Image (cartoon, grey):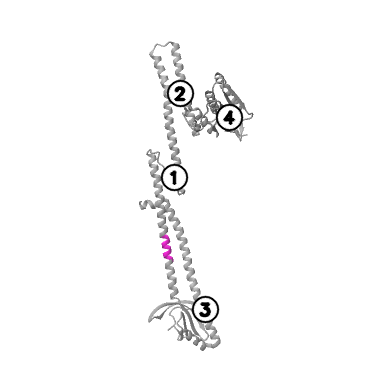
Amino acid sequence: MQLPRLVRTSTFRLSLIYLSVFGVSVLLLLGFIYWSTTQLAILQTEETIEAEITGLEEQFRRRGMLGLTEVVRERSANQRQSLYLLTNSERFVIAGNLNAWPEVETEVGGWFDFPYQRPIGGEVETHVAHARHIVVPGQFQLLVGRDVHEQREVTKFIKTSLLWALALTLALGLAGGVVMSRNLLRRVESVNRISRAVMEGNLDRRVPMTGSNDEMDRLAQNLNAMLDQIQRLITSMREVTDNVAHDLRSPLNRLRSRLEVTLMGRPTDAELREAIEQTIGEADELLATFNALLNIAKAEAGTLEVASAPIDVAHMVADIAELYEPAASEKSIMLEVAVSDGLNVDGDRQLLSQALANLVDNAIKYAPSNGVVMLRGARDDGQVELSVTDSGPGIPEMDRKRVVERFVRLEASRNSPGSGLGLSLVSAVAHLHKGELRLEDARPGLRAVLRLPVAAD
């Protein structure tokens, strides 16, 4: 995997941002630790020196200058970290373990650092001391200090260790960012490969999942669900195309054959008129099929123009019952109507009437002779429920979701007239009005329920 491409990934940039914030935080923390350690060491040294000075002042008050000189000589003879130097006003050495007064600027009562030579193991080494300058009555000068060479070495070691810790932290963070970016980029590349394969027409490809249930797995799951839906839609579109070609081929063939037969002979005016009327009828059926397809597509896309207005459900049902009463009587079917009073919905009366008429037409078509078709309207849980129940063969439960698709016709209805678009149109109109179509078992027969929101007051 190319490094420039890896560096340009959002994961790597986020890792750098996080690493920068973390690095600054670690730097501040380590800096505070270093400063605290240094200050603590200096404070301990100065407290020790202050204790030494307090003891020497006590000896001076009790025993005078001779006693102070004797104590300085005793303490100077002890090989410790403490340093002493007692001089007169001319800085002539009286007692102490230093050969001369340090050649640094000193302030009476102030603290200062100075280098000095110290014999260790037969060799002379240059060390650093931290001391305080005190004036003793009589213009005598007193220096009390401590060797801080080891302390400085420890502090230097701590500083070096902290810097290495910071560098190691940044290096590990950068390496972690590279590893995370590589892993994420590998999974993104997998999505890109699948996307290219799908764009090339291989609709069976799916994005692999690792099973970690992280955000990339959830993205892959959603993409796979989207690809499944796209595949279903494309498959459905192909089926619709095939069904359109199959269902429209027969009427077109009949129309063409009728015209050819008419032209082959010498028809009378009556025969010619009859042929033209039959041709117009076939053309009307084709136009009705195409109009139904167009309305379904517009309704599903939400672009169908809806003249929304309050609709009296009882009046609409009565009109449809009156329209289909002759067709029901012709098959000796009893058409029962029962609608509650005060039912109103908002919507397009023409579309809703067409949807309900399709349900009644199907019920009469598939109900047996001397059967019953019941048309009901009632209010149920804030919805207006319009149901059409027949006593026909019904629809198996496994096929109820499929029959609302375009041009889907079950084997039992292949020989009956129709295009297979009626229930599709009803479902599309229901969704356009924020309602739904349910198909239920009437035992025997089918109960088609159209549920719509109650009109606003």
Which tag, 3 or 1, sits closer to the chain's start?
A: 3
How far is mark 2 from mark 3, CA to CA?
112 Å
Q: Secondary structure at mark 3?
A: helix
- Name which quarter of the figure residue 319 lies in: top right
Instruction: Report which residue position mark 2 lands on.
Output: 286
How far is mark 4 from mark 1, CA to CA?
42 Å
How far is mark 4 from mark 2, CA to CA?
29 Å
Amino acid tagged 1: Ala
Crowd around label 2: few <14 · some 14–19 · many ≥20 (10 Å): some
Instruction: Report which residue position mark 4 lands on.
Output: 386
Instruction: Please indicate, yes or no, whether residue 88 appears anywhere in the rendered image.
Output: no
Residue furthest to the front: 443
Which tag, 4 or 1, sits closer to the chain's start?
A: 1
Answer above or below: position of 219 versus 330. Answer: below
Amino acid tagged 2: Leu
Instruction: Report which residue position mark 1 lands on.
Output: 220
Amino acid tagged 4: Leu
Residue furthest to the right: 341
Crowd around label 1: few <14 · some 14–19 · many ≥20 (10 Å): many
Name the residue nearer the viewer: 333 or 131.
333
Answer above or below: position of 102 versus 280. Answer: below
Which tag, 4 or 2, sits closer to the chain's start?
A: 2
Relative image position of residue 191 (x, y in whole percent): 41, 45
CB-based contact (under 8 Å), mark 4 and mark 1:
no
Instruction: Report which residue position mark 3 lands on.
Output: 50
Name the residue nearer the viewer: 85 or 4.
4
Question: Residue at the spot x=50%, y=74% of the render?
Answer: 44
Question: Residue at the spot x=45%, y=20% of the render?
Answer: 282
Which tag, 4 or 3, sits closer to the chain's start?
A: 3
CB-based contact (under 8 Å), mark 4 and mark 2:
no
